[in-house]
Amino acid sequence: MATKKLDLIPLYEWGMFTEPKPSVVAGPCSAESEEQVMETAKGLRELGINVFRAGIWKPRTHPGSFEGAGAEGLRWMQKAKKEYGLKIATEVASEKHVFECLKFGVDLVWLGARTTANPFLVQEIADALKDTDIPVLVKNPVNPDIELWIGALERLSRAGVKKLGVIHRGFTTLEEKKYRNDPQWQIAIEFRRKFPDMPFFVDPSHISGHVDYVREISQRAMDLGFDGLMIESHCSPSEALSDSSQQLTPAQLDDMLNRQLEVRNPDSDSPQWKENIHELRAKIDVIDESILAALSSRMQVSRQIGQYKKENNIAILQTSRWDAVLAKVIEKGRGYGLSEKCITDIFNTIHEESVEAQNQILSDSSSRQK
Ligand code: PEP
Ligand code: MN
């Protein structure tokens, strides 16, 4: 579907983020008590954070989990705003939440992944935001559906929201993976290509699901040239009532942001910026990962075929079949501007590996015939 250009106000004109990159929104997954909000906010203020996040209404996967402090939590955030001069941000999932936020002087709201996936809710929120000036960030939906994400942005844009940006928080997958939510960076890159002017945040906390990986995801976000990070930070992570394994202490966040993270070329006005070498290399890394994943899926299917051949006593190699495959990929490759030699070399190597895997299956006496 063709994407319409949205009417956007640049990030640095929102009145809460300043150069250089990254723009950071940090704070606990949830506001839990006045003490926890104030202590975390103080720690974050001291390390230079300007925008403080906390979930007030928590959309939990299972009932019975901590579902947020509700409007009372907004009072604590309001106090943190006043005492430490922070801007405050929270997630909204209904019209009622928007009205409460406006009442308590919330400076930025975001739509969570489960809300973006529901056009009825997005529309309700967009209608409630009409005639306000509050910045809105939209997390990607839980499923890797870029159109659903764009649709949510269009609804908000039509309601007049111009301080509009996105947060990439990864996608739910069924497979067991290293990270809690699969980053699928190629989707983020594709989104950026469609909307190069849309402020783009990455949420390394929800992507990684664990403090051990927050830094590498943040670094990847910087390497890919994204604008900002939304990071969960809690004064005492082990006691957190939600997402305890992925929250950094303010001191850990300080270390990561101010000492470990390498921020690439902060000169965002330079014409080279969008295509600088780090960004291009990071894109290559993402593509290489997709190639590896595709090769691995191909090998899995190839092994299944090997098993079938074994069960039906069929020879591994059918030369005519391979000739046909090769001819097809050479023809397709030509359409992609790839030379015959390149395709022949690559696919012969792939085929060799595949034959080798099937050979092993056929010669393996433990994989019994049915
Ligand atoms: C959150 O930011 O605390 C949250 C619930 O995130 P998500 O919507 O990405 O799951
Ligand atoms: Mn969380």
Image (spheres, helix red, strand yellow):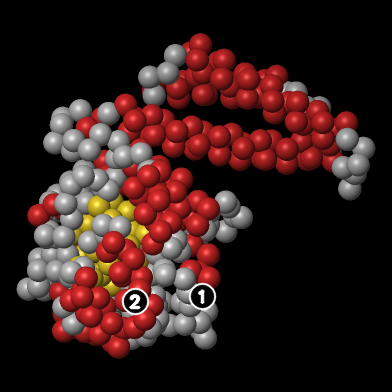
On the image, numbered disc 1 is attached to which residue?
A: 239
How many numbered circles does the render carry? Answer: 2
Mark positioned earlier in the residue sequence (2 or 1) = 2
Q: Residue at x 48, y 32 (%)?
A: 288
On the image, numbered disc 2 is attached to which residue?
A: 37
Q: Residue at x 20, y 50 (%)?
A: 198
Image position of 360 (left or right of 43):
right
Q: Which image quarter: residue 298?
A: top right
Q: Residues within 10 Å of mark 1 (few under 14, many from 20)?
A: few
Label 2 CB less than 8 angstroms from ligand 1? no
Q: Which mark is residue 365?
A: none
Which residue is at the front of the view, 74 or 136?
A: 74
Counting from the top left corner in percent of width and height, residue 71 is at 28, 87
Amino acid on which disc 1 is placed: Glu
Counting from the top left corner in percent of width and height, residue 220 is at 40, 42
Q: Say if 280 sits above or below 211 in the image.
A: above
Which residue is at the front of the view, 176 or 244?
A: 244
Q: Residues within 10 Å of mark 2 (few under 14, many from 20)?
A: many
Q: Say if 186 sits above or below 214 in the image.
A: above
Q: Secondary structure at mark 2?
A: helix
Q: CA distance from mark 2 to mark 1?
A: 13 Å
